[in-house]
Amino acid sequence: EDRAPGPAGKPLVFRVDDSTPEVVQSVLLERGWDKFEQGGQDVEDWNLYWRASSVRMAKHANIKPWQRLNHPPGTTRLTRKDHLARHLRHMKTTYGAALDEFVPLTFVMPNDYSKFVAEYFRQKPGAGGARSCWICKPAEACGRGILLFRDIKDLFDDAYVVQKYIRNPLLVGRYKCNLRIYACVTGFQPLTIYIYQGGSARFATEKVDLGNLRNSHAHLTNSSISKCGASYVKVREVVGHGCKWTLGRFFSSLRSWDVDDLLLRQKINVVILTVLAIAPSLPVAANCFELFGFDILVDNLKPWLLEVNFSPALSIDCSADASVKRKLIHDTIELTYLCGLRNERAEPRDGAKGRRSVSLAKLHAGGLSKPGSVRSSESLLQRTSRTLKDESAVKKALKIGPENKHASQPREMASGQKGLLLSTKEPPGPNAPPVHVAQSVVRGQDRRLPVRPLAQQQVPGLQAGNFVLIFPFYEATFGASRNGLNVRSIIQELRKLMKS
Ligand code: ADP
């Protein structure tokens, strides 16, 4: 519970609008937060504004030090299919081949029309004259307006992307499935990414049949489509009821079928590359975070990124949703709000290192080595924690030793937090004393000080609930993400990581 002690003992305040998912509100109430009432309290008296739609720049410009927004500006560069395709293409052109190989060949229409036509005719028809299969998707489809086609005559005339159709994805009981992987970016400057160890596998409700491209219940795995199919209520081979499994059930099934899920999970690091494609182009914005939903199709244990979702669906439609989504919101609040704000507060550094070591020890000894956890993140984490717990390595990465004055120092001194820069303070656990942040800021009379973005100038926590830090990893990426974003050097480190 985040309820504050202290003289006033006021709870934190959240703001919502009509678009905010019900589960967000109910989790925040469960954690002891109060709901902001328009007219009932000071207009600035809120700590978190969570909405499904994007936030106007004016809101970002006027954000107060004690407030958080759940959308930074500009993240539709990742979540609109056409923008994502362009950014990934740009990254590939700038930093070299093999970087976008986790995305099916994509053409953004109408600009890429002639390139698509050339590719279409370059691919020779197979036996029987059948051409390759393509999928045409509006930039923001959400399952609507999607078309599969083999004949170029069927292409429609609008803004959309055309993608090579992955025809032989991993099937479960002959049903197509894809994975919903959640990732939370708690800061773009410096870039800090967490991956969620929960998530879901989503199934089509009819068996795959490449002879019938019109059957959306066989070819599309969006749950909004599956729920409307006649077969949704039937018990299906292997999959069973409904159209979703938890990711844990999916991975343990892979293991029981002797499929090497380690390889697959390692490749989920595509999340880092994808976020890197847009991070340098985003405007600076303080005090925001974004929870993304990555949709990944698996083909011969290779992950294909289909799209990244803005405000991923948080409705609870089945038992898999119930076990994943409530905890996801709890952990998101824990990660982005409590950890971030507590790390920002001027707290004495004494003893912090000791607490951090306990946390790292727990990480090594505990959950991350359990079956069902993300082993790719585990190895990444182990290496990252080795680096980040070594304060001298972090100093080196930040280039802020006492002899080397860093540009951010005046801000540190202004807020009276000299020394916090290298804090290795552990993110608070469930028993940490609760804090009323707005109140603490006012009490310290630093309400008008510049905002320190989440995770800036400090070692990010390695884990919060089921969120695991995947970026920065190693000393080199820590440095490359702090002093401006050095994408080239980060990509080099990623290449090394993928080879290791
Ligand atoms: P949206 O969720 O906005 O409708 P997606 O890109 O996720 O758009 O596509 C919807 C569904 O179509 C996916 O869940 C997947 O089942 C299927 N799909 C999308 N792109 C491909 C592709 N390139 N190959 C195979 N199936 C695809």
Image: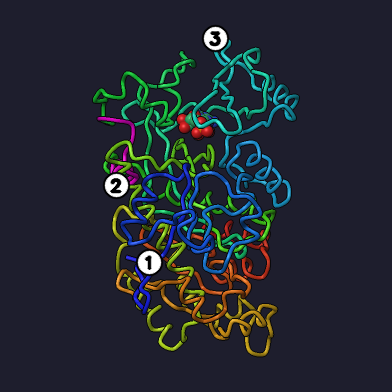
Q: Residue at x 29, y 37 (%)?
A: 318
CB-based contact (under 8 Å), mark 1 and mark 3: no
The residue segment tinted magenta is 241-253
Instruction: Compare residues 291 and 370 and report the one nearer the observer.
Output: 291
Magenta stretch holds residue 252: yes
- Give residue 323's mark: 2
- Residue 295 in the image: above or below residue 267: above
Instruction: Compare residues 389 and 282 and report the one nearer the observer.
Output: 282
- In what element is the residue under mark 1? loop
Residue tagged 3: 128
Q: Position of residue 252 (x, y in %)?
A: 29, 45
Instruction: Compare residues 140 and 276 and report the one nearer the observer.
Output: 140
Q: Residues within 10 Å of mark 2 (few under 14, many from 20)?
A: some
**Disc 3 residue: CB within 8 Å of ligand 1:** no
Residue tagged 1: 11
Q: Position of residue 39 (x, y in %)?
A: 49, 55
Identify the image quadrant of the N terminus. Answer: bottom left
Q: Residue at x 64, y 79 (%)?
A: 411
Instruction: Compare residues 354 and 41 and report the one nearer the observer.
Output: 41
Q: CA distance from mark 1 to mark 3?
A: 68 Å
| Residue mark closest to the camera, 2 vs 1 | 1
In the shown orientation, is residue 236 left or right of residue 207? Answer: left
